Amino acid sequence: KQEVTQIPAALSVPEGENLVLNCSFTDSAIYNLQWFRQDPGKGLTSLLLIQSSQREQTSGRLNASLDKSSGRSTLYIAASQPGDSATYLCAVIGSGGSNYKLTFGKGTLLTVNP
Amino acid sequence: EAQVTQNPRYLITVTGKKLTVTCSQNMNHEYMSWYRQDPGLGLRQIYYSMNVEVTDKGDVPEGYKVSRKEKRNFPLILESPSPNQTSLYFCASSLTGLGYEQYFGPGTRLTVT
């Protein structure tokens, strides 16, 4: 059974700092990995999608990398801003046979202090 | 506007009273799914549907039913709700589910007393 772990569970940084969020998964047979942002009481907003054949994806100040063989992904946020404060979730979708389930990590709660 | 909509957004009900949470998407997506989010447990998939002909269980399907009679709609049915089904529920869709990003609805907060 696929398990997804996110470290750290919570992170507090001063504004302007660069930071890295980590995501690991136990089964490397995945179709893709997706990073989301969730604001309190709100739904999920997709940030980046990395296909299993890709190594990284970039969008603005965000860069996500994927090392499928080691079961790891990182989300790099450059020059953090208070508006980046949210919970960040990673999720993988399996590729084994008919396994099309999406499995989430429990998230990293990021606080960026002005 | 491309979106996933859920109704109702908030619901308080009593044990055993059947309820349905609707989910609709206007993006012509094949793949739709339901999740519940609980403190300390994160998001867990309840059911998913690859297309109108294929529906399968996720990690926590017990106590739930789904129906995919048409592409755009994927209702979640609780035949006999219990207090342990109190949770925040999300519906999501993607073009095929295998190589495309997931789009989430705004969530339905359900309380079963």
Image (cartoon, coloured by chain):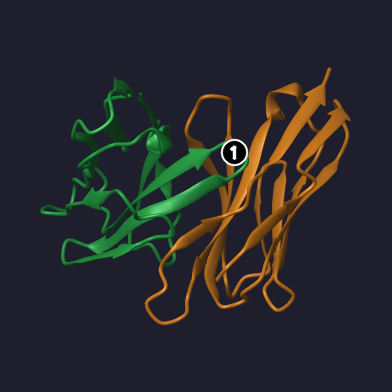
**Element at badge 1?**
strand
Q: Which image quadrant is residue B26 in? A: top left
Closer to us: A22 or B109: B109
Q: Please say if B105 is above or below A104.
A: above
- Neighbor class of circle 1 (other Cα within 10 Å; few <14, some 14-19, many 20+) is many
Vertical relation: B50 (above or below) A39: below
Q: Is residue A90 left or right of residue A14?
A: left
Apparent side of residue B22 relative to residue B46 in the rendered image (left or right): left
Residue at (64%, 60%) from the top-left corner? A4
Q: Chain of mark 1?
A: A
Determine the residue positioned at 23% across, 39% down. Answer: B80
Q: Residue at x 26, y 59 (%)?
A: B30
Q: For mark 1, what is the residue?
A: A37
Return the residue found at the far left: B69
Q: Position of residue B113 (x, y in %)?
A: 35, 23
Q: Is residue B65 above or below residue B57?
A: above
Residue B31 position in % (x across, y down)? 30, 58
Instruction: Name the quarter where the N terminus of chain B is drawn.
Output: top left
Residue B98 in the image: state x and y as whole percent: 41, 67
**Viewer-proximal residue, B4 or A56?**
B4
Residue furthest to the bottom: A97
Task: Note whether B22 is above or below A28 in the view shown.
Answer: above
Residue B88 in view of the camera: no
For this rendering, which residue is in front, A27 or A47? A27
**Chain seen in green:** B
Name the amino acid type tagged 1.
Arg
Q: Which chain is orange?
A: A
